[in-house]
Every structure is written in C-alpha cells, then in structure tokens.
Amino acid sequence: MGCVERRDDRPSASGHRGGARAERRPTRPTLRLRACLDTSFLIDVLDGDEGARAVMTDLDERAERHAVAPVTAAELWIGANLGSVQEYRRTEELLESLLWLEFGRGCARRAGRLQAELMESGSPLGFNDCVIAATALEHGQKLVTSDSDSSRCRTSGFGLTDPRQSALSPVVLASGVRRDSQAPRRR
C-alpha cells in the first residue's frame, strides 16, 4: 500500500503542523463505485459458486467498489440467522467488506415507478427485488445478480447481459440463470 505525505498547515493527529514534520498516511488505490451486488449473487458467493467468484474477481480486477442495498443485507441476515455459526460469521465478514447504499426518497420514488411499469406490462418483481433494482438505478450502479427475475427489468430501462461481454449494462446476470425466486434460498 502506498503512502502520501501530508504537507499542509493543519495540525496532524499527533498535533504537529505540516512542513518539517509531515505525517505519512497510507493511501488506497482509487476504486470506482460501480457494482451493486444483489442477494442471489451474494448467496452464490457465500456458497462458493465458481461463476460468482469469477465475477467478483473480474470486478476486483477492474478496481470496482462493491456495494449493497440495505434490503440485500437484510435478506442475507435472514439466512445467516437461520444458518450455522460459521455461515453467520461469513455473512458478517462479507457485509463488512461492502459499501452500503442509502435508501431515501429518490430510491422509493424510483421503486414505485419501476414496479408500476412492470405491473402494467404484466410482470411485476417481488417487492424486495424491485427495491434493490431501484436502489442500484438511483445510485447509478450496475446490478449484479444471479436471479433471472431481473430480466423483467428490460422493459424499464435495464439491460441484461453477461458481465464478461459488457461492463456498461446496468443489470448483469452473473452466474447463469438458475432460479426465479423472490426470497433468498436457505443455505
């Protein structure tokens, strides 16, 4: 990890001013926040799915910061609380490594609009999936998911692609279409 020298006149944590006694502090590589990870995808990661881990590696190599919607975290905590102590710890460790996106008025408005459009087209999403998708949209994130239900978002401005083909699509179907569940599966 690199370091930068602090050279301004503000006091450092140790009380010294910049200049002769510059403080060295660690720096981190610049990460772009571009990937909101969905519950289905994170369950696959926790379960050791090779496809999901390959996508995580790909995101890491692109220096993309991983984020999570609060609903996703809540869904993962349900599984963690129903599972073993080891599953609980792995979930806790994973969630600690992610940036949590805020859910505010804009996200709520967007979720309502998205679900209304999907209802009008005859293919609504489950409530949690809709809120997660809207949170990703509102924050300008790609939604990385393993849930084929997300393909319904195509009618509402989302595209759905394989992550290795395009890094620009707002919805990325991560490790293959495997299920159409609206609730997290139990590990």
Image (cartoon, helix red, strand yellow):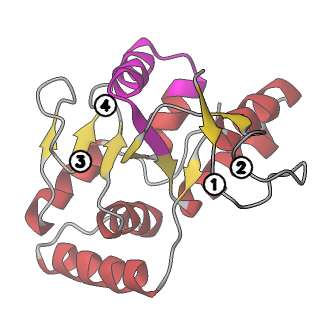
Q: Secondary structure at mark 2?
A: loop
The amino acid at mark 4 is: Ala
Q: Secondary structure at mark 3?
A: strand
Q: Which residue is mark 3?
A: 171
Q: Which residue is mark 1?
A: 8
Q: Residues within 10 Å of mark 2 (few under 14, many from 20)?
A: some
Q: Which residue is mark 2?
A: 18
Q: Is residue 182 left or right of residue 25?
A: left
Determine the CA span between mark 1 and mark 4: 45 Å
Q: Residues within 10 Å of mark 3 (few under 14, many from 20)?
A: many
The amino acid at mark 3 is: Val
Mark 1 vs mark 3, foreground winner is: 1
Earlier sequence position, callout 1 versus callout 3? 1
* Displayed quadrant of residue 138: bottom left
Q: For the magenta stretch, what is the residue range? A: 45-66
Earlier sequence position, callout 1 versus callout 2? 1
The amino acid at mark 2 is: Gly
Earlier sequence position, callout 1 versus callout 4? 1
Q: Secondary structure at mark 1?
A: loop
Q: Which mark is residue 174?
A: 4
Q: Residues within 10 Å of mark 1 (few under 14, many from 20)?
A: few
